[in-house]
Image: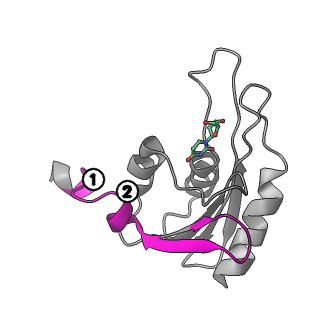
């Protein structure tokens, strides 16, 4: 799966974002090593705290369908700038692999690719509890 195609899929997912409060729409698309794609968008709540980010929706759909082998995730928010995942999402992601590729996009042509370890160095993850 090309990074650009995964960004395009994330852009399509962004159209579903439910953002009556911030109006800031985010889309995410996960690609697994086994070739599956899962998408997500942010979903806001009138009581604010339950709001969930696009990344965690996509990853939750992936994990809850039994796919734990995440290879990469593409994220796209406002096209004014490249969108990087929030701290909570970085921590949520690290559960499923520090070597995960994180594609942070502004549009289909402008994006940066990181490993999760670069975005969350010295992380507390599953191996920390052994
Ligand atoms: N948001 C995401 O979906 N992903 C992030 O990584 C950062 C923030 C959402 C949450 C909220 O609905 C809106 O963007 C503004 O914070």
- The answer to whether the residue bearing label 2 lies less than 8 angstroms from the nearest atom of ligand 1 is no
Is 115 placed left or right of 112 in the picture?
A: left
Q: The N terminus appears in which quarter of the rendering?
A: bottom right
- What x and y, as percent, mark residue 70? 51, 68
> Disc 2 on helix, strand or loop?
helix
Among the 4 quarters of the image, the one containing residue 17: top right
Let me know if residue 1 appears in the view: no
- What x and y, as percent, mark residue 114? 44, 71
Q: Is residue 117 above or below residue 17?
A: below
How crowded is the residue under tag 1: few (<14 C-alpha within 10 Å), some, or many (20+)? some
Q: Residue furthest front?
A: 80
Among the 4 quarters of the image, the one containing residue 36: bottom right
Residue 71 is labelled as: none
For the residues bearing labels 1 and 2, Cβ distance under 8 angstroms = yes
Residue in view at x 59 percent, y 56 percent: 83
Let me know if residue 130 appears in the view: yes
Of residue 124 and residue 106, the one placed in the foreground of this image is 106
Is 55 placed left or right of 42 in the picture?
A: left
Residue holding disc 1:
125
Of residue 62 and residue 52, the one placed in the foreground of this image is 52
- What x and y, as percent, mark residue 86? 48, 46
Magenta span covers which residues? 104-127
> Taking the image as four quarters, which one is ligand 1 found in?
top right
Residue holding disc 2:
94
Residue in view at x 18 percent, y 48 percent: 129
């Amino acid at each position: 799966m090309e990074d650009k195609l995964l960004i395009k899929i994330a852009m399509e997912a962004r159209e579903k974002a439910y953002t009556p409060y911030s109006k800031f729409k985010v889309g995410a698309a996960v690609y697994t090593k086994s070739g599956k794609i899962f998408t997500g968008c942010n979903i806001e709540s009138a009581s604010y705290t339950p709001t969930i980010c696009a990344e965690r929706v996509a990853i939750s759909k992936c994990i809850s369908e039994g796919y734990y082998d995440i290879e990469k995730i593409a994220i796209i928010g406002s096209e004014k700038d490249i969108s990087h995942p929030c701290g909570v999402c970085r921590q949520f992601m690290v559960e499923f692999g520090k070597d995960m590729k994180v594609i942070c996009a502004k549009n289909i042509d402008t994006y940066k690719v990181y490993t999760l370890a670069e975005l969350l160095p010295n992380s507390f993850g599953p191996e920390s509890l052994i």
